[in-house]
Image (cartoon, rainbow, N blue to C red):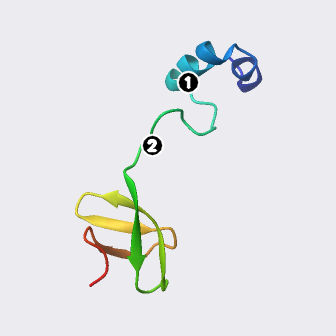
Amino acid sequence: MTREQILNLPRPLRIAVQLVAPTGQHRPRGAIVDTRFVDCTPCGVSTVASVHGGTVLCAEGHQQPVGGAQ
């Protein structure tokens, strides 16, 4: 199916199809990667970061421990 065909489906069916064949839009109900807000010292702000094992990576690419900058 093309992206346009998937987006034209009724909403419940569209959500089910997008889980199997994503259209590049945000996935419904949940993220693929665990995210959280952290205080990033290099950025100087509280920002969203993705968790990768024992490290978090802020939106600007700064790495720090899961507990945040120390």
Disc 1 residue type (three-letter): Ala
Horizontal and vertical percent for residue 8? 76, 18
Rendered residue at 55%/24% (across/down) = 21
- The reply, left or right, for residue 34 in relation to residue 25 is left
Which quadrant holds residue 38? bottom left
Question: For the residue labelled by badge 1, is the local secondary structure a helix, a strand or a loop?
Answer: loop
Which x, y percent locates residue 57? 39, 67
Quarter of the figure that contains the N terminus = top right
Rendered-image quadrant of the C terminus: bottom left
- Could you tell me residue 63's position as x and y percent? 36, 74
Residue 1, above or below 54: above
Please name the residue shown 22% across and 63% down the image.
Answer: 54
Residue underneath mark 2: 31
The amino acid at mark 2 is Ala
The residue wearing badge 1 is 21
SS of the residue at dot 2?
A: loop
- Residue 25 at what x, y percent from top left? 63, 38
Task: Calculate the distance from the C-alpha at mark 2 to the C-alpha at mark 1.
Answer: 16 Å
